[in-house]
């Protein structure tokens, strides 16, 4: 049973059903695997193995009574340290929340529990999801399983690395500007950001409210589809949650294999210009050629405001963040500085001590762009250009069903390489952030390895609620290649 | 105050709306509950929580706006007002900066007349807007630290902002009384200032008389009673007058009123003023106001206190002395309306309410004023209608009615029951009264002679003993006729 | 276009974040870099463009009815709070 940890959900479901193994055995296999590789990967901030084993035993008990709950019953799911799980620490990789325990479950956690999933671990991330490398964690850096001196990407670096290294079967991350897709690309797994409003944000500690979405990490498209399906749906507790009929993504994928729909795919010229790594360009072009060879229609398109996405994104995201993070103030539940003398002292010092460098940088930036005299020049202007970016996509989607781009301009970089140059770090999100600004769904799919054995990710962007389209397009590629079976050498 | 200057005053009034739950969470609210017993993860701004609008707050605020003659916006949006304060869990307040729900409007006020019994001049004070926002928690202070109770955090507030359209402390007081009464009539808030349900900030500036440009203003925060508003404005006018008279400039600043010291103190200057960094809240969606619903609300709007007072004076011919008392209290005038609906004798009913009922309320309330609410007593409006009816039908005298009234108030029994139980109805038993009359005539020959000589009042001497004998129950009208008939039949 | 200057001290005060002198210096340089990069945005005439505050155009979202939900036990707040007394959260004396 040594290979359980690298199995897919379909195999595990079958095995659990046929009693080939129990959920407790599956959980033990993951714990053993994690004990073996975690000292190298460092994907977890915190894990309660006993609690996970207890949940697994409950699942086995349900199964013995023929009372399984849902498609994920008995399957462990790793959780990014930004999603609230009742009774578990919720630190957002920050010293600010070092002793905070959440008294309630996020909506997605509630949904996973209702589906029978085992909620396991607090996966590492950039502090408050601010970063693209997981170096900005108060609890240490996660390594890229493919090359341990490289970063895994971020902010959901722990979620991506844990899936890639077989520590978890699937995991949840969050994506504000690429924080699922970029680490998925760097770690060679599938990562998906759903349409804004498809998954409830209740219980997701807000970074930038108008951009944040929760999404799945998996080693293949079907597993991502299963996990996504279990967390979508309208939630009255999130006013931005949308009332849309839920789709059975897995059966859509199974159907698609039989009657292959040939989509029209758009290739935006702006995403293949300067700054793009030559090997990545080559791999993504090769994938596009494959689609063409399969009868897909390939169209060159233009997203003319693409080069404005980074500044627009960093203005909106930091502005919202500066306000969202104001609640971490040293008063009710966060770190409070010692020997404070006044209320202002309490605010200044608790926040000065509790927040890391990148978080402070973004709070300062966000505060500045909203401050008196600068609002129109920065925030309002960014909101207006955001409309233009959305319009670019709307226009493109009149001609194409989905858009293909590289997920990142470079493969995973060496730890420390960009951490002292925030602007170059921000530019790493250049291909992913426009999707958040426009509120669209997108996924990153492994399309091979560089000569240095680092994964390359391809991004497929869909229309609003085009989840089933992009899953289908990705799945078609995946089953006709064997990149999903590539494993890091740990 | 020297006569050189004129004060210009604008007020901002925060009113807690009477919803059961908070504006953006379903935590209940109740004044006086145990500290921090009415919170939830949203109220405390725990990580990951999100606000969801309570539509009732929109409804109540729109109703208030209509009552005050505001324009109701087609769409309202939510903004974040960012500032750090320990009673504000998110360290931003959800408010309506750009798109308030209610725009414009006015409040009709009555200035004090030359005496209590003479109606004063009326005028309209213009409003700028009314917007919705959330209340912060409550801080209390010890000698060395401060304690926070978050129960109040998130309670919906309507913030009513006037134009700088008031010119004296008396006008401000008249405005607040009028506004408070209007809100109580609308039923959207209890406006109990002691419970913090209504709070006021005042902006005050002076300018040379007969000029139109506004002077530099100071803002006085934290005024939690109408008398504090009056005192703070008067203090501020004096303070600014002294500054101007000594040829100094008034500083633009925020000041805090200390009701114990009867002084205001500077909190912060314009330079240190907040930079609130307003921006549209990304967690809440805009609300498009349903015009049909606004029409419905407008149709169902209660009568305003001053309209009601005018109607009482014009249609019911009640004097100002009565209507000013009746309409100043929504419970009292609603009580009057109820009684009137059951028996149409406005003057008599109003008299009972304004004189007898208020007296009973005053003598039965602990504080000695008439603030004991009618709802809290056993008194019913129908009792007063019945009482007036039995008096007017001659069943009891006005004097007996006083006794019945007290009994009604104390016991909560209806007047007919009291009259029956105590045998108070006027006797119209002709044979008994005739016998008593004949006895009286026989005993008072002198009075009969005087009566016959044309002194009609002499007959009253006969009535006293008869009333005494019947314990006041003889119907005076019946008695009069009978005595006259009997005396005339003596001839 | 002249380069935007950022008054780090003022902004840090607004944001209630204490910065060391070194942090202040570093941030000043980095912010000016970032703000310089943001000047790209000035290439667009935004006069007649509607700002986009939400990713999806949705309106009129509210709770069904003014119905009370559950409350958080006050003991939980006491447990979470760095300092509390008599069921209330304690902070240094607020002068205002
Ligand atoms: Mg105000
Ligand atoms: Zn206010």
Image (cartoon, grey):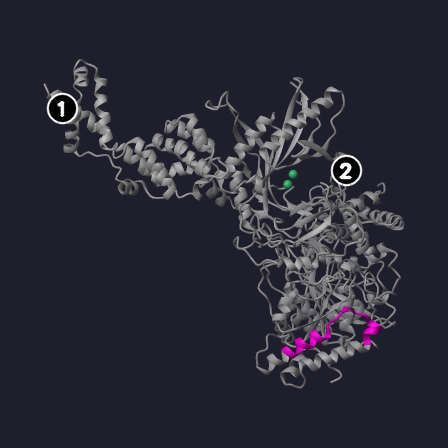
Residue B255 vs residue C68, the one in the foreground: B255
Question: In terms of sequence position, does the residue under pointer 1 or pointer 2 come before the other?
Answer: 2
Which region of the structure is painted magenta? A37-58
Look at the numbered disc 1 and give the secondary structure of its residue: helix
Tags 1 and 2 both on a single chain: yes
Label 1 neighbourhood size at 10 Å, few (<14), some (14-19), many (20+)?
some
Instruction: Give the image location of residue A127, x and y in percent.
Output: 78, 60
Circle 1 residue? B486
Instruction: Give the image location of residue A429, x and y in percent.
Output: 79, 59
Residue B267 vs residue A439, the one in the foreground: B267
Instruction: Give the image location of residue A250, x and y in percent.
Output: 63, 73
Left or right side of B122 for A279: right
Residue B325 to residue A453: above or below: above
Residue B286 to residue B129: above or below: below
Q: Residue at x 44, y 39 (%)?
A: B364
Q: Main secondary structure of the magenta part?
A: helix
Distance between the alpha carbons at the discs numbered 1 and 2: 94 Å
Q: Magenta stretch: residue A473 in it?
A: no
Residue C88 to residue B157: above or below: below
Instruction: Give the image location of residue B90, x and y in percent.
Output: 69, 51
């Amino acid at each position: 049973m040594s290979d359980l940890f690298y199995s897919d959900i379909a195999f595990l479901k079958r095995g659990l059903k046929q009693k080939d193994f129990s959920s407790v055995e599956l959980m033990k296999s993951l714990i053993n695997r994690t004990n073996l590789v975690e000292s190298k990967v460092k994907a977890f901030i915190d894990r309660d193995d006993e609690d996970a084993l207890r949940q697994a035993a409950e699942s086995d008990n349900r199964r013995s009574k023929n009372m399984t709950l849902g498609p994920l019953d008995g399957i462990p799911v790793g959780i990014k340290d930004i999603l609230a799980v009742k009774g578990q620490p919720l630190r957002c990789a920050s010293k600010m929340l070092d002793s905070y325990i959440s008294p309630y479950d996020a909506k997605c956690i509630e949904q996973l529990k209702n589906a029978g999933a085992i909620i396991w671990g607090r996966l590492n991330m950039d502090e408050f999801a601010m970063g693209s490398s997981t170096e900005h964690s108060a609890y240490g850096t996660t390594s890229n399983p493919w090359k341990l001196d490289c970063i895994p990407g971020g902010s959901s670096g722990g979620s991506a690395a844990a899936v890639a290294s077989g520590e978890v079967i699937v995991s949840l991350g969050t994506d504000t500007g690429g924080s699922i897709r970029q680490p998925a690309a760097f770690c060679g797994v599938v990562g998906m950001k759903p349409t804004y409003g498809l998954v409830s944000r209740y219980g997701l500690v807000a970074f930038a409210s108008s951009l944040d979405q929760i999404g799945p990490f998996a080693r293949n498209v079907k597993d991502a589809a299963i996990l996504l399906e279990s967390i979508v749906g309208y939630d009255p507790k999130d006013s931005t949650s949308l009332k849309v009929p839920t789709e059975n993504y897995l059966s859509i994928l199974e159907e698609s294999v039989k009657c292959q729909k040939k989509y029209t795919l758009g290739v935006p010229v702006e995403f293949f210009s300067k700054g793009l790594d030559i090997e990545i360009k080559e791999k993504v072009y090769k994938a596009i050629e494959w689609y063409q060879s399969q009868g897909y229609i390939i169209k060159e398109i233009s997203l003319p405001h693409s080069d404005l996405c980074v500044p627009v994104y960093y203005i909106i995201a930091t502005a919202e963040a500066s306000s969202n993070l104001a609640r971490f103030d040293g008063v009710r539940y966060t770190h409070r500085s010692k020997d404070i003398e006044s209320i202002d002292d309490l605010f200044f010092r608790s926040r000065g001590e509790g927040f890391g460098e990148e978080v402070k940088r973004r709070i300062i930036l966000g505060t500045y762009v909203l401050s008196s005299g600068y609002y129109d020049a920065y925030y309002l202007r960014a909101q207006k250009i955001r409309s233009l970016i959305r319009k670019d996509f709307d226009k493109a989607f009149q001609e194409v069903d989905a858009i293909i781009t590289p997920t990142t301009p470079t493969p995973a970089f060496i730890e420390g390489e960009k951490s002292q140059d925030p602007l170059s770090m921000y530019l790493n999100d250049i291909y992913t952030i426009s999707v958040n600004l426009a509120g669209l769904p997108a996924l990153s799919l492994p399309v091979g390895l560089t000569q240095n054995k680092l994964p390359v990710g391809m991004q497929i962007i869909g229309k609003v609620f085009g989840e089933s389209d992009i899953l289908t397009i990705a799945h078609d590629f995946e089953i006709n290649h064997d990149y999903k079976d590539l494993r890091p050498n740990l | 105050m020297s006569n050189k200057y004129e004060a210009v005053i604008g007020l901002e009034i925060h009113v807690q709306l009477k919803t059961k739950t908070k504006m953006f969470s379903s935590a209940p609210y109740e004044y006086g509950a145990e500290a921090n017993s009415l919170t939830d993860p949203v109220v405390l701004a725990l990580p990951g929580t999100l606000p969801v609008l309570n539509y009732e707050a929109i409804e109540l605020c729109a109703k208030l706006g209509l009552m005050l003659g505001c324009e109701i916006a087609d769409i309202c949006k939510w903004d974040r007002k960012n500032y750090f304060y320990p009673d504000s869990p998110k360290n931003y307040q959800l408010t309506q900066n750009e798109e308030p729900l209610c725009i414009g409007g006015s409040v009709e006020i009555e200035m004090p007349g030359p005496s209590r019994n003479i109606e004063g001049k009326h005028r309209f004070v213009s409003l700028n807007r009314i917007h919705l926002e959330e209340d912060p928690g409550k801080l209390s202070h010890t000698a060395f630290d401060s304690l926070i109770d978050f129960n109040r955090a998130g309670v919906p507030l309507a913030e009513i902002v006037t134009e700088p359209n008031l010119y004296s402390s008396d006008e401000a007081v008249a405005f607040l009384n009028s506004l408070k009464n209007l809100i109580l009539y609308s039923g959207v808030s209890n406006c109990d200032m002691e419970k913090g349900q209504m709070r006021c900030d005042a902006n005050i500036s002076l300018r040379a008389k007969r000029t139109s440009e506004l002077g530099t203003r100071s803002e006085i925060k934290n005024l939690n009673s109408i008398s504090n508003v009056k005192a703070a404005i008067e203090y501020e006018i004096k303070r600014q007058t002294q500054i101007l008279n000594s040829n100094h400039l008034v500083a633009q600043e925020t000041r805090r009123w200390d009701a114990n010291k009867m002084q205001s103190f500077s909190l912060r200057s314009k330079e240190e003023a907040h930079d609130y960094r307003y921006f549209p809240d990304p967690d809440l969606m805009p609300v498009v106001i349903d015009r049909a619903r606004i029409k419905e609300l407008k149709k169902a709007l209660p009568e305003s206190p001053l309209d009601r007072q005018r109607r009482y004076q014009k249609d019911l011919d009640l004097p100002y002395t009565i209507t000013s008392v009746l309409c100043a209290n929504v419970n009292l005038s609603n009580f009057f309306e109820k009684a009137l609906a059951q028996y149409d004798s406005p003057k008599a009913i109003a008299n009972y309410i304004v004189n007898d009922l208020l007296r009973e309320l005053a003598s039965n309330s602990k504080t000695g004023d008439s603030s004991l609410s009618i709802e809290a007593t056993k008194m019913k409006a129908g009792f007063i209608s019945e009482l007036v009816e039995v008096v007017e039908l001659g069943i009891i005298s006005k004097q007996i009615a006083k006794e019945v009234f007290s009994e009604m108030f104390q016991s909560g029994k209806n007047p007919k029951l009291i009259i029956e139980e105590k045998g108070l109805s006027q006797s119209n038993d002709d044979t008994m009264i005739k016998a008593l009359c004949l006895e009286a005539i026989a005993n008072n020959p002198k009075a009969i002679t005087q009566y016959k000589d044309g002194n009609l009042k002499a007959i009253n001497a006969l009535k006293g003993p008869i009333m005494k004998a019947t314990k006041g129950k003889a119907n005076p009208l019946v008695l009069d006729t009978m005595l006259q008939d009997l005396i005339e039949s003596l001839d | 276009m002249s380069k935007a200057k950022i008054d780090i001290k003022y902004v840090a005060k607004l944001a209630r974040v204490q910065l060391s002198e070194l942090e202040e210096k570093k941030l000043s340089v980095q912010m000016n870099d970032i703000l310089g990069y943001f000047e790209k945005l000035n290439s667009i005439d935004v006069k007649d463009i509607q700002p986009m505050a939400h990713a999806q155009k949705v309106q009129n979202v509210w709770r069904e009815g003014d119905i009370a939900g559950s409350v958080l036990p006050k003991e939980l707040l006491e447990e979470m709070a760095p300092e509390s007394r008599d069921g209330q959260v304690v902070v240094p004396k607020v002068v205002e």
